[in-house]
Amino acid sequence: MLYPELFKQLESVRWDMDKDIPWDSFDPAKLSDEQAQTIKMNAITEWSALPATEMFLRDNRNDSDFSAFMSIWFFEEQKHSLVLIEYLKRFRPDLVPTEQELHEVRFEFEPAPALETLMLHFCGEIRLNHWYRRASEWHTEPVIKHIYQTLSQDEARHGGAYLRYMKRAITKCGDEAKAAFAKIGVLMASARRTAQALHPTNLHVNKTLFPRDTIQSRLPDPEWLERWLDTQINFDAVWETKVVERILHNMSLLMDRSFQSVQELNRYRKEVTASLAAAGAGPAPSAA
């Protein structure tokens, strides 16, 4: 089991909201209304760890090890929302999300293949790590800069934990896991070719609720993410390239094969899918 070891590792570096956040360093002159509004949106978005955890537990009923790890991931992700809300309570109480605004992002995700969902969230952790690093640079107020840097480090550690479960899946499932991971890897590393940033919070997960079937669509300001990325934190091609490089690097480690581009990863995906088909297993099912 991976859970006991991961528990010890993550417990040893867990930060304390009272002791490790420099609340006394707050500088009101360096927090703009525009910046404060984005903190509210991120606080609500982070609350979506709740429905994501419900999805993980439902779709991994046969995996008690991974389900136990969710106790760590859920706790730390909800703390991300809590620390952003605490910041607003202290310094911009007019922008604290209401309970209803938080509850709006809790809705049922349709069942999807567990392996593809695992890879999707692994890539999401990589992307959030980079988004929050960039957010920390964009903000001018010292406390929120520190908070975003802290959150980015958590996301990196979560990505590392997911990677451990992905390695285990390849050992157990072989080409089936490789095909699922390569498929989602190609999707998530192709954000530069799409009209929107690809992240679990803005992917469609419940067709019966369309068009309000994504986390972002259920926020008070559904358009905020693209504006935050494009014109506020300026998550440009240089930063997007960093995300793609991390995905390709980790895919190279997982598959024991070098991928220098999304095209190379896609060719590998086709090879593994063809191998599965030839063996009679067929391609991995598509995610919802």
Image (spheres, grey):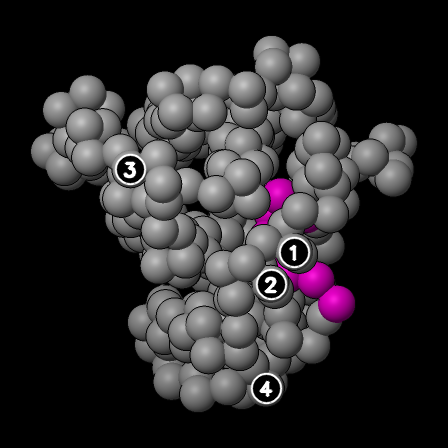
Q: Residue furthest front?
A: 29
Contact, mark 1 vs mark 2 (Cβ under 8 Å): yes
The mark that comes first in sequence, 1 or 3, is 3
Contact, mark 4 vs mark 3 (Cβ under 8 Å): no
The local secondary structure at tag 4 comes to helix
Question: Is 69 on the left or on the right of 146, as rendered?
Answer: right
The question of residue 66 being in magenta is answered with no
Residue type at tag 2 = Thr
Where 177 sits versus 101, above or below? below
Residue type at tag 4 = Gln
Please identify the quarter of the rendering in which residue 20 is found.
top left
Magenta stretch bounds: 195-202
Residue type at tag 3 = Asp
Q: Which mark is residue 227?
A: 1
Residue under label 4, please give it: 263
Q: CA distance from mark 1 to mark 4?
A: 29 Å
Q: Which residue is drawn at the image coordinates 63% and 50% (left, top)?
A: 225
Residue type at tag 1 = Arg
The mark that comes first in sequence, 2 or 3, is 3
Where 263 sits versus 136, above or below? below
Q: Which residue is drawn at the image coordinates 72% and 54% (left, top)?
A: 286
Residue under label 2, please give it: 231
Where 194 sits versus 163, above or below? below
Q: Nearer the viewer, mark 1 or mark 3?
A: 3
Q: CA distance from mark 4 to mark 3?
A: 47 Å
Q: CA distance from mark 1 to mark 3?
A: 25 Å
Q: Which mark is residue 27?
A: 3
